[in-house]
Structures are given as C-alpha cells and as structure tokens.
Image (cartoon, helix red, strand yellow):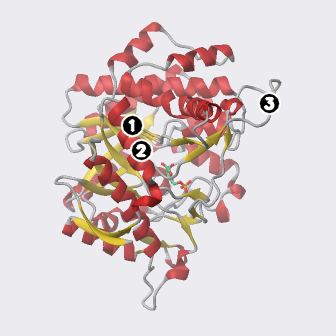
Amino acid sequence: MALKKVNLPENFILGAAASAWQTEGWTGKTEKNMNYMDGWYKAVPELWHDGIGPTVAADLYNRYKEDARLMKEVGLNAFRTSIDWSRFIKDYETGEVNEEAVQFYNDYIDEIKKNGVEPMICLEHYELPLYLFEKYGGWGSKKVVDLFVKYAEQAFKHFGHKVKYWFTFNEPIVVQTRVYLDAIRWPYEQNTAKWMQWNHNKNLANAKVVKLFKELGLEGKIGAILNPEVTYPRSSAEHDKKAAYMYDLYFNRVFMDPMLKGKYPQDLINDLKKHNCMFDYTEEELEIIKNNTIEFLGLNLYYPHRVKARSTAWNEEIPFHPARYYELFDLPGKKMNPFRGWEIYPKIIYDIGIRLKEEYNNVEWIVAESGMGVQNEAQYKNEDGQIQDDYRIEYISQHLYWTLKAIEDGSNCKGYMLWAFMDNVSPQNAFKNRYGLVEVNLEDNRNRRIKKSGNWYKEVQENRSFELEIFENEYK
Ligand code: BG6
C-alpha cells in the first residue's frame, strides 16, 4: 500500500450533476406540467421511500441562488442538470414556452455562471411530459419524437447563447427497461417490442436534435449521456463470453452503436427479427441516425455487470427478454456498497474508457455520473454536525484515479462529474440513499450543509491534485 499523489490534467472538468425533477420541486408547476416521474409518484406514492417523491424534492426552485453559491463553495467547475420539459413547454403540441419557466431557467443558469461554474444542460432526464405519455404512449410514438425536436429548438433558442454543453438524453434506456422489459415500474406493462420501439425512437430523437443543433450553427457541443453496463463474463469460457456479448448487445450497443457509429449492430437486428421484436423504422430514419452521430459522450458509471451462461433452459412460452441469453453472476467476495446494493469496482471507468478508444473512434467523453449513495448519513455527523463522509472521499479518489489512468493510456476523457452535487430524490428510493457533497436536511427545513467530501472536493479543485492509497493489484 502506498500513498500516491495524482494530478488532474490541464482543463480537466471536475464537476457534479443533478437533474431537474430530482431537485426542483413542484413550485411553479400545475397539473398540466407533470412529467412521467411525477405521474409515477402520483400513481403509487406508497411505494416511494417514506412516501416522499418529487413534490418538494430539494426545493431548488426556491433556493437556486443559495445552491449556485454552494456549487462554487464545493469547488465545481461544471454543473450538469436538466430542463424539465414538462415545466418549460406550455403547449406540448405547438412548442409554445411557459414564460415563467423561461425566466426561472434563465436566472438559474445565470446564477450558476456568476459563480464561475460551467452549466451543462440535458434535455431529458426522464422528464417526458405525462400528457405525451398518456396521449401518445410516450417514446413509443414518432409524434413525440417530433415534439421533442420542437422543445429542443425552444431550449436552444432561449439558452443556446449561454450554455456550451448540451445533452439530448440522460440514460435513454432506463425508463422503458424498468417499465416494459422488467415491468417493475409504473405502469408495469411487460412488452419487449415496445421496449425496443422506445429505444429506436430515442436514438432517432437524439439524431434529429443533433441535426438541428448543427443546422442552427450553435457554438458548443451536443452529445448524450449513456449508462453502459460495463459487462464482464464470469469466465473466459466461450459460453460465458457469449452471455456477456449478448448482454452488451442488448443493453449497451443498442445505444452506443447508433449514437456513435450511426448504425445498429447487425446481430441485434437479426436477433430482434428472430424474436418478433423488430422495431418500426424507415430508411430515412436510419439515414438520419447515420448522418448525425454524437461527438461528445457522457457516461454514467456506477458498478460492473457480471454475467454467466444460463444454467437452466429459457422458457420459450414467456415473452422474449434478453435474459434468454444470460444469468447475472454474483462474484464471491466482491466489494459492495451495502446501502445501494451495488458492487464497487472503480476499474469500470478505465475499461470503458479504453473500449471507447479502441472500438468507438476514441470519442471525446466525460464521466457524467459516478457516486455513492449512503443511507442514514446523519450517523456520521461530528460534534459540530458536519457529515464526515470519508467513505465518499475514498470512493471518489479511486474512481477519479481510474479515470485519469484511462487518460494516461490514451482515452479521450475530459472530466469527472460526481453524482450528486447535493442530496436529492432518487427514483422510488427518494431520500433513502444520500449522494451529495452537500447535505439536504429533511428534519430542518431542507437546509443545506457542506459535507466533509464537499470541502475535500474543493481542495482537489484548488490544488488540481489529490492523494490516495492505491492497491493497483486489486484491479488487475
Ligand atoms: C443514475 C440516474 O442512473 O443514477 C440518476 O441518472 C440517479 O437520476 C442515479 O439518481 C443514482 O441512482 P439511484 O437510483 O440510487 O438514485
């Protein structure tokens, strides 16, 4: 074990992330401004941890000035959030904006910049308007794709001159995977073909918005934020490698290939056809996808996915699911975050970074989310009441270390964004697991207090370096 000093490269982005629906709260929204997440919470509030949902969230809508100051105090040089489509647009069909929301996002972005922090804006972090979900079936509909483009045009028109980093989607695979593939989220409908249609329509929407961005000649970058499930086979045996290949095809390459290479993998298309899950498309749509790939990628990276070949035969009578090809593999002795139930394996960042270099033309990218959710953090308060989250400092140090190592080995990574800037509402888990550099105290009027990790993050930013205990062999 050795203490190692690690330097951040020049211009390396060290920031943090959040999203609109998880922080803002409903101030200024009416029944007409609900999004899919709001709708899910309203349908089954009892399933959300302690019955808490996005209603108040972190109340950022009312406290953004204080929060922007805190961003500076914890040393962020960039902050990513989203625009809540359901708040920003008044008439989803025509794209008419809600002037009050325009004012809010203008002030919010200005305040972030005033504090020396670079804003990065995502257009959809699950905030699909509930109206479009109910009326058209959400992302299953091509009409919604075009309405998204209308919304994006308004966002670019209003904020394009002050925001230089844009993302179309955050984790575009997630909602439909939970809703239509695994049926564990409202409205709990298992429908694999619908799952794939949502995937395709989001790939199309991404390409159409990228096209628009280019046509408008906006300065800056546009990309998307994906959550590749960095996949490892149980063993080097062919059957396990095949399981990992299929997992990767269905959960990673389904977005990475069209968005970065402009084309779906042929194996995916063949397999979808075989299982009658091929999506509706036109040649023109495939052309749009082909000609509008992204040049800047955000990756949310939390934990590895380990798979093995199935040990039991797949029941062909149940609807097709990619799990036909794999079972999840539980690695004995793995290091865990026991609160969230996720394995801790910081080398995922390095591995995907090298993969981007080798297989995806070394695209420019950032770690768009990485972080550790911990339950009941109040138990770690010192006498003065500050949360002493040394575990988070260790987590960040190790993940940052592997990010920098990927850069050293030629990966085109430009930054690391922590999830999250402050504690906020998680899907269904609400405030159960806390992720922030800044505490949001629910017992005390949602008052903010910087955690130990927030002070440490600022030091890293100021020194442009940090020290960590590294056990490199652990990850060989
Ligand atoms: C990412 C999402 O998947 O993970 C965030 O972009 C989310 O919205 C974060 O909050 C952490 O996951 P969770 O479920 O613990 O909130």
Q: CA distance from mark 3 to mark 1?
A: 32 Å
Is residue 100 among what the camera can see?
no
Residue 272 to residue 306: above or below: above
Residue 380 to residue 243: above or below: below
Q: Residue furthest bottom?
A: 383
Q: Dot 1: few (<14), some (14–19), or many (≥20) neighbours within 10 Å?
A: some
Q: CA distance from mark 1 to mark 2?
A: 6 Å
Q: Dot 3: few (<14), some (14–19), or many (≥20) neighbours within 10 Å?
A: few
- Kindly indicate the quadrant of the structure image that contains residue 39: top right
Q: Residue furthest left?
A: 10
Kind of element beneath mark 2: helix
**Image marks 3 and 1: residues in contact by CB distance under 8 Å:** no
- Kindly indicate the quadrant of the structure image that contains residue 34: top right
**Image marks 3 and 2: residues in contact by CB distance under 8 Å:** no
- Residue visible at 39% across and 32% down? 151
Q: Residue 387 location, x and y as percent?
A: 45, 79
| Residue closer to the observer: 270 or 34 | 270
Q: Give the residue type that dot 1 points to.
A: Arg
**Image marks 1 and 2: residues in contact by CB distance under 8 Å:** yes
- Residue visible at 35% across and 51% down? 80
| Residue closer to the observer: 291 or 46 | 291
Q: Give the residue type that dot 2 points to.
A: Asp
- Kindly indicate the quadrant of the structure image that contains residue 400: bottom left
Kind of element beneath mark 3: loop
Q: Which residue is mark 1?
A: 355
Disc number at residue 351? 2
- Residue visible at 31% across and 39% down? 166
Tell me how many marks there are: 3
Q: CA distance from mark 3 to mark 2?
A: 31 Å
Q: Which residue is mark 3?
A: 313
